[in-house]
Image (cartoon, rainbow, N blue to C red):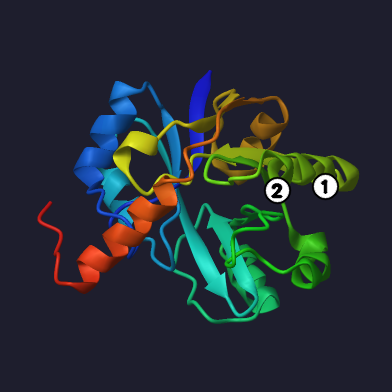
Amino acid sequence: MLKADLHTHTYFSPDSLTSPEKYVQACLKRRINCVAVTDHNDIGGALAVEKLASFKVIIGEEVETSEGEIIGLFLQEEVPAGLSPEETVRRIKEQGGLVCIPHPFDRLRGTRLGEAALMRILPQVDIIEALNARTTLRGDNEQAVRFAQEHGLAMSAGSDAHSARELGRACVEMPDFEGPREFLQALGEGRIVGRLSSPLVHLWSRWAWLRRRLGWRPTG
């Protein structure tokens, strides 16, 4: 069985300081053997982790669309930020990727995809993130579970880690897979496990963003 954290970040995101090396070390320490690296508008972190890791790595991206965030999984190419949700989904699908909606009902997350946009692209959505460890209000994750069940969609879980210590906070225990089709099947057979992070992790991300604005540069 895999222990899969399906929403994570490295310092290729502007609000993280986690190097690919530290990321891999933390995963090994926590016995995480499958990850989706989903940096903001960038697949560079996912490619870097893939080169270093002995475990399964899904190339992903958390894309900032004109109406909120959408995650693409199993990507071959980066999807530009700022496109409409419809065009973002089209570009994910045309390269064989899967569409995942992160933290869809997080009332405190201004970057979530708007409900109107979600309903417009719903026929193209593959996965709803049912447990995001950085969602502060437990009921918002519960609403995501209900929505996925009502619409017959696969459910994922992720720590949304922006620091190495958060990795593995929310995972799916699932069978092994090869490729997007088997991944969806394995998700359906999986079990979501984990717990919410402290709300203070959002302050850490803000500090990381500010530190980078003040000149911090990755050193490896």
Give the distance between the C-alpha atoms of the residues marked 1 and 2, in whole angstroms: 8 Å
What's under tag 2, amino acid-wise? Ile
In the displayed image of the protein, which residue is found farthest to the right? 150
In-image side of 121 versus 171 (left or right): right
Give the numbered dot on residue 147: 1
Q: Residue at x 25, y 53 (%)?
A: 17
Residue sticking out furthest to the top: 1
- In percent of width and height, residue 148 lies at 80, 44
Amino acid carrying mark 1 in the image: Phe
Residue 26 in picture, x, y percent from top left: 28, 31
Answer with left or right where residue 166 lies relative to residue 156: left
User: Label 1 crowding class (10 Å Cα cut-off): few <14, some 14-19, many 20+?
Assistant: some
**Residue 171 visible in the displayed image:** yes
- The answer to whether the residues at label 1 and label 2 have Cβ atoms under 8 Å apart is yes
From the viewer's perspective, is 80 left or right of 167?
Answer: right
- Number of numbered callouts drawn: 2
Check disc 2 and report its element: helix, strand or loop. Answer: strand
Side of 57 where 102 appears, left or right: right
Q: Residue at x 30, y 64 (%)?
A: 209
**Residue 205 % position (x, y):** 36, 56
* Nearest the eye: 76 or 81: 81
Crowd class of label 2 (few under 14; some 14 to 19; many from 20; radius 10 Å): many
Pointer 2: what residue?
A: 128
Please give the name of the residue rendered at 59% of the width and 67% of the height, measured from the top-left corner: 110
User: Horizontal and vertical percent for residue 176?
Assistant: 54, 26
